Image: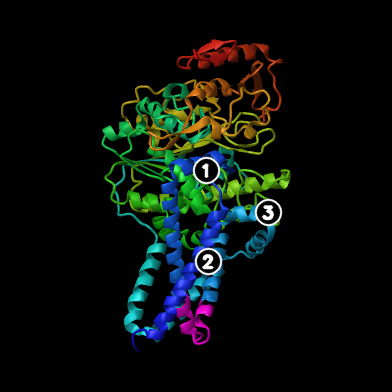
């Protein structure tokens, strides 16, 4: 055997060049045909802003993606020619044949990527035409393992071709490299052994209490949580004060109501962060705990929260992230080859794609982070998988779905439906199947994480809590989709489960059905640890059994007026997020709410108050404030307003609601409206 011949080297060079150029042409086609969008909408204003202020970074981002694409194409060209050499098919038209092999390998990679994560390909599917028909055929075939096997099978002739052309001296180091990469990409991550005595807070985005199978749901959505419930203190009726992620994180960690901590939208300014009260991580840090937060895409806001975390492992999000992730999400060849551990190193933007949520990848990052952490530690894990657009990877994406469904919700929930499509009952059934599948995937990943931490000793004498930042509406009658817009159609968007493990006799395992608030969690953990309470917390430790607990909630910023179509003609109006938000150029290019809307969005929000089995809705409208009263036991969907039939109860609860309104800083009450001096 001899080193590579001059003739074969020239063939390799030509194959790499042409394959790289081919990949480059595909990249440019995808790039030029994609626009800049946010929340599913193309935005001329955002595009103009990129051109005026971020053009250099935008071009640099795409130059990086272009360079990776060219390199990937070139490497495939070399690989394809080695495959041909191993099969003895390199003598006639070798370069043309190598390009055909590159095309076949690319189709195989795209097929595997699509079957494992079909939600990434929702745009060509919704666009219809030939691409949608091909995706339909491939999805019906299923079995990504088969196509993965074909891809891996091409490695044998490639190695054989290298051996034939360059001998064992070249083959051995390549085989070592391939083996090392394979081991690194597939190995289970197990941290070094720990001692225990830790505190772990697990947050699952959009976790509905009534979708936990161990609490009575008919589908087996949470088998890993279920098998641990016998040892848990269970609070199935936990209500959140504001069903949006950022405010939820603040009240969970500070034990304060929204009126106290001041974070009322997803887009606060820096001065609002600076006024936050003392939080749980700060308190635990002073007690000697190492404090760490690990999150995927919906937890990117943890970087902005000055609450005392020593370390935050989460994607970064600001305005630059919008065009960076948009640049990536239409590059199908890159998604086909690099949506894996190696790709996440090369392309951090993969972690920011809402359609690419992967709880298993998050757990890998958690276990990597935990290894070597000084104990005791406070670890907060935020898992985004069940959040809109309810995407999950194979096999969870089809676990509960109707195999014959072919509508626009097949792979994920689109921001906007194709023109002319009217939502059907089968669409709604599919949305619920997507949510349940995403929850099942999150549950399995949580189970693996807890099993690994337990086997390594980290859970010895440890305290664990699991809850949701908010619930979710899933097209229940009058409820629509999402969270934080209203309370019509039931309270599933504000009701979450809370589980506590490791509390011992002070909070023994069992079910506690009384209504509690999420702001009670931080005081409970500190009480169990026998640490000083948070000085400004209004939450009450759940160890206090007979406490009458207020349950209050309010809506958030209305992102899109179409989400409030049920009451759009009545609500106090303001524009959608593309008009109400701006870029804080002096604050890290963060997206913030414009100052002129700060007070209006508080005046306009709906509010909820619970008193035993009764719910009062406060609904400020253009023609006055309206109150609606519902009996939750007989009418959980809140379809029958009993305000006129229960005047005494209405008057009592209205007075209670007015007390909550008086908590608004710098505001006054006029005809039951919350008004500000400006």
Q: Which numbered disc, 2 or 3, marks the residue that appears first in the sequence?
A: 2
Q: Is residue 256 left or right of residue 434?
A: left
Q: Which residue does the numbered mark 2 point to in the structure image?
A: 109
| Residue positioned 55% across, 20% down in the render | 603
Q: Which numbered disc, 1 or 3, marks the residue that appears first in the sequence?
A: 1
Question: What is the crowding at mark 3: few (fewer than 14 residues within 10 Å), some, or many (at least 20)?
Answer: few
- Residue 270, given in percent of the width and then of the height, sits at 39, 30
Is 612 located above or below residue 413 in the figure? above
Marks 1/3: CA–CA distance: 39 Å
Q: Is residue 345 left or right of residue 333?
A: left
Marks 1/2: CA–CA distance: 32 Å
Instruction: Let me know if residue 652 is in the magenta part.
Output: no
Mark 1 or 3, which is nearer the eye?
1
Determine if residue 494 is in view: no
Q: Is residue 236 left or right of residue 400?
A: left
Q: Give the magenta range.
A: 80-98
> What secondary structure is the magenta-colored segment mainly?
helix
Question: Quick one: SS at disc 1?
Answer: helix
- Residue 134, given in percent of the width and then of the height, sits at 65, 63
Q: Which numbered disc, 1 or 2, marks the residue that appears first in the sequence?
A: 1
Numbered label attached to residue 47: 1
- Residue 139, given in percent of the width and then of the height, sits at 63, 61
Q: Which residue does the numbered mark 3 point to in the structure image?
A: 402
Determine if residue 429 is in view: yes
| Residue positioned 56% across, 16% down in the render | 657
């Amino acid at each position: 055997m001899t080193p590579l011949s001059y003739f074969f080297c020239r063939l390799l060079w030509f194959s790499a060049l042409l394959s790289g150029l081919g990949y480059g042409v595909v990249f440019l086609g995808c790039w030029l045909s994609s626009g800049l969008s946010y929340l599913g909408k193309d935005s001329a204003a955002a595009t103009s802003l990129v051109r005026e202020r971020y053009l250099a970074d935008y071009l640099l981002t795409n130059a990086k993606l272009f360079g990776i694409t060219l390199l990937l194409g070139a490497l495939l060209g070399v690989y394809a020619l080695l495959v041909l050499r191993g099969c003895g098919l390199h003598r006639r038209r070798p370069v043309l044949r190598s390009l055909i092999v590159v095309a076949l390998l690319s189709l195989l990679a795209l097929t595997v990527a699509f079957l494992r994560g079909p939600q990434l390909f929702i745009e060509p599917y919704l666009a219809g035409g030939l691409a949608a028909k091909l995706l339909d055929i491939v999805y019906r075939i299923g079995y990504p393992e088969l196509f993965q096997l074909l891809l891996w099978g091409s490695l044998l002739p490639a190695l054989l071709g290298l051996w034939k052309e360059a001998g064992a001296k070249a083959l051995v180091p390549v085989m070592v490299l391939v083996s090392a990469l394979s081991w690194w990409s597939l190995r289970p991550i197990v941290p070094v052994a720990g001692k225990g005595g830790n505190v772990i807070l697990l947050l699952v985005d959009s976790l509905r209490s009534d979708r936990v199978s161990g609490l009575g749901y008919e589908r087996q959505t949470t088998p890993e949580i279920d098998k641990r419930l016998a040892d848990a203190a269970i609070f199935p009726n936990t209500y959140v004060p504001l069903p949006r992620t950022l405010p939820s994180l603040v009240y969970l960690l500070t034990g304060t109501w929204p009126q106290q901590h001041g974070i009322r939208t997803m887009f606060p300014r820096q001065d609002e962060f600076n006024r936050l009260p003392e939080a749980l991580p700060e308190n635990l840090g002073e007690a000697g705990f190492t404090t760490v937060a690990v999150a995927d895409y919906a937890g990117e806001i943890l970087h902005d929260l000055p609450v005392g975390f020593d370390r935050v492992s989460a994607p970064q999000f600001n305005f630059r992230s919008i065009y960076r992730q948009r640049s990536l999400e239409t590059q199908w060849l890159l998604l086909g080859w690099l949506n894996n551990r190696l790709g996440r190193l090369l392309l951090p933007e993969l972690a920011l794609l809402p359609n690419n949520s992967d709880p298993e990848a998050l757990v890998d990052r958690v276990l990597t982070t935990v290894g070597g952490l000084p104990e005791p530690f406070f670890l907060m894990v935020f898992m985004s998988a069940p959040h809109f657009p309810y995407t999950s990877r194979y096999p969870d994406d089809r676990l509960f779905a109707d195999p014959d469904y072919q509508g626009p919700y097949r792979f994920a929930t689109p921001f906007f439906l194709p023109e002319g499509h009217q939502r059907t009952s089968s669409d709604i059934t599919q949305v619920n199947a997507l949510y349940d599948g995403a929850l099942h995937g999150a549950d399995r990943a949580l189970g693996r994480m807890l099993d690994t931490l337990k086997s390594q000793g980290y859970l010895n004498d440890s305290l664990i809590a699991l809850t949701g930042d908010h619930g979710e509406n899933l097209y229940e009658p009058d409820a629509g989709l999402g969270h934080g817009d209203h309370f019509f159609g039931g309270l599933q968007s504000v009701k979450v489960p809370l589980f506590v493990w490791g509390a011992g006799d002070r909070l023994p395992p069992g079910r506690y059905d009384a209504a509690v608030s999420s702001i009670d969690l931080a005081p409970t953990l500190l009480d169990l640890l026998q640490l000083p309470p948070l000085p400004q917390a209004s939450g009450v430790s759940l160890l206090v059994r007979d406490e009458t607990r207020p349950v209050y909630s309010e809506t958030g910023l209305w992102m899109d007026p179409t989400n409030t179509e049920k009451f759009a003609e009545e609500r106090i109006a303001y524009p959608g997020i593309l008009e109400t938000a701006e870029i804080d150029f002096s604050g890290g290019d963060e997206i913030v709410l414009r100052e002129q809307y700060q007070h209006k969005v508080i005046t306009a929000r709906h509010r909820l108050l619970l008193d035993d089995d009764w719910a009062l809705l406060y609904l400020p409208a253009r023609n006055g404030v309206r109150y609606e009263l519902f009996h939750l036991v007989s009418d959980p969907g809140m379809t029958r307003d009993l305000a006129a039939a229960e005047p005494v109860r209405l008057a009592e609860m209205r007075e209670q609601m007015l007390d909550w309104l008086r908590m608004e800083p710098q505001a006054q009450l006029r005809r039951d409206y919350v008004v500000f001096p400006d």
